[in-house]
Image (cartoon, rainbow, N blue to C red):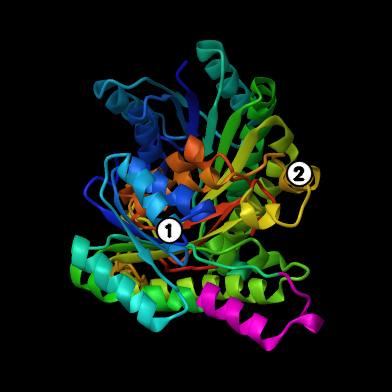
Amino acid sequence: MRLQGKTAVITGGAQGIGRAIALGLAREGASVVIADLQGGKAEAAAGETRALGVQALAVETDVASERSVDNLAGQALGRFNQIDILVNDAGIFPQARVTEMSEDDWDRVLDVNLGGNFLCCRAFAPSMRAQKSGRIISIASGIAHTGGIAGAHYAASKAGIVGFIKALARELGPDGITANAICPNIINTELPRSHRTAAELHERLIRNPLGHAMEPEDLVGTILFLASDAARYITGQAVNVNCGTVMI
Amino acid sequence: MSEVALVTGGGNGIGHAVALKLAAEGIAVEIVDWDEKGAAEACREIRTRGGRADAARVDVRRSAEVKAAVARVVERHGRLDILANIAGGAIHRKRIEELSWAEWKEVLDINLKGTFLFCREAAPIMIGQKRGRIVNTASNYGVTGSPLRTPYSASKAGIIGFSKSLALELAPYGVLVNVVAPGPTDTPRVLEGWDPELRQKRAAEIPLGRNGTPEDMAEAFYFLTSAASACMTGQTLHVNGGWVTP
């Protein structure tokens, strides 16, 4: 168990990719704090991780709210004293073309996806600095590199995460904290399922050089690597986990 | 059945650390190196620790030697799961107008052609197995460039482009091809050639405040050979303490 004695905060940890990450971290022995807008689902996910023998705390959190994120940090640090790993996964993707995109659409996507990264990193960086260690891992997207139709706000927010993480890595590196992003391709979660038939979804999921339909669990290996001592010298990087779709 | 790896440049520096790491993970390792003594020493180290290793002297520029090296592994183990191309180096630090054609060729051949030759021999075996991992070695200089290192930068950028194309060629067969791009790494060869003061100055420019170690690099190589990276191909993993963030 590579993460025995460590504690991780996972935003968006109640379902999909975040939930898979929380379970993956727990399987390696890490205690987890599951932060999610959906408090009930966060509690259910916390229960699942407890069943793996680790401590877990669910905190209903809006990552785009300063007050809510401060509450998350207060509760997480109050309960566990030390947060070793922060995984920023909370994100939204309401589809809209730029010409039909409202200012509210734009603000909400940027506030949650990118602003949430800022607020959560700002909230947990001081304690990581004090303990001279920490791992920050943000879920960006291959769309940061390629763009995509009906998702300009999403692409901007995800590319923003990559830039933000690179800058943050330089700021926090001297204190022994690493910050990296993961850029996945489309993954079989509720979001892509919501507007496709099963056949359309499958065709879309396997459209990559390896012909593999990525599940949330497929990101866990990279998360565990970046969270572990093995990746101690890797920071400021955007790691593409995408079955070869984008090679940058 | 346990896995089998071939590590070029395994007698020294990063290659040595990779060979030891893979062996420590239970993988049988064939070490090839221009430096016969280094390869034999690495082999002894692994065996002393209870691992499985063999060693051979190979000039990665010579296709007959490469062919024979891969054939030996297959003869010995009946398979080849992992190829780590690490042999290489930043020799001939010179301004372009002082660089001879022979020197240019030497750098390109050791770094880029050697990688091509080993991949060409290993690919059919891995395709036949429907499984395989190739990890090639670039450098942050392949992305950023560096004065006095034009052939080295060209060879390392070449390895990145080559690996992307090979990843696409081999993806249908479940063979993954990725690249580790080390930053400044304290290998014995680098430590010997570097002014310690300059080295300190460099370390201060790196966000994590130190140069890399061969062991730091070995972890990234191992990750890219393991199940944890099963959805990665054609990618370049930069291991440089945050110095270069492309």
Q: Would you name the residue on which mark 2 appears? A: A198
Q: Nearer the viewer, residue A216 or B55?
A: A216
Q: Nearer the viewer, residue A90 or A135?
A: A90
Left-right relation of A34 to B123: left
Crowding near the residue tagged with mark 2, few <14, some 14–19, many ≥20 C-alpha atoms within 10 Å: few
Q: Nearer the viewer, residue B180 or A205?
A: A205
Q: How many marks?
A: 2
**Where residue B2 appears, x then y in whole percent?**
45, 19
Q: What amino acid is found at the position of numbered circle 1 in the picture?
A: Gly
Report if residue A102 lies within the magenta region: yes
Q: Residue at x 44, y 78 (%)?
A: A118
Q: Would you name the residue on which mark 1 appears? A: A40
Q: Residue at x 61, y 41 (%)?
A: B177
Report if residue A38 lies within the magenta region: no
Q: Nearer the viewer, residue A41 or A218?
A: A41
Q: Mark 1 against mark 2, which lies toward the viewer?
A: 1
- The numbered mark, 1 or 2, whose residue comes first in the sequence reads 1
Q: Main secondary structure of the magenta part?
A: helix
- Same subunit, labels 1 and 2: the answer reads yes
**Chain under disc 1:** A
Image height of A45 relative to A114, above or below = above
Which stretch did the figure color magenta?
Answer: A95-114
The answer to whether residue A42 is seen in the rendering is: yes
**Where residue A195 appears, x then y in whole percent?**
75, 57
Q: Residue at x 79, y 81 (%)?
A: A100
Image height of B223 relative to A93, above or below = above
Q: Residue at x 60, y 51 (%)?
A: B235
**Chain under disc 2:** A
**Where residue B237 appears, x then y in whole percent?**
51, 54
**Where residue B158 appears, x then y in whole percent?**
66, 54
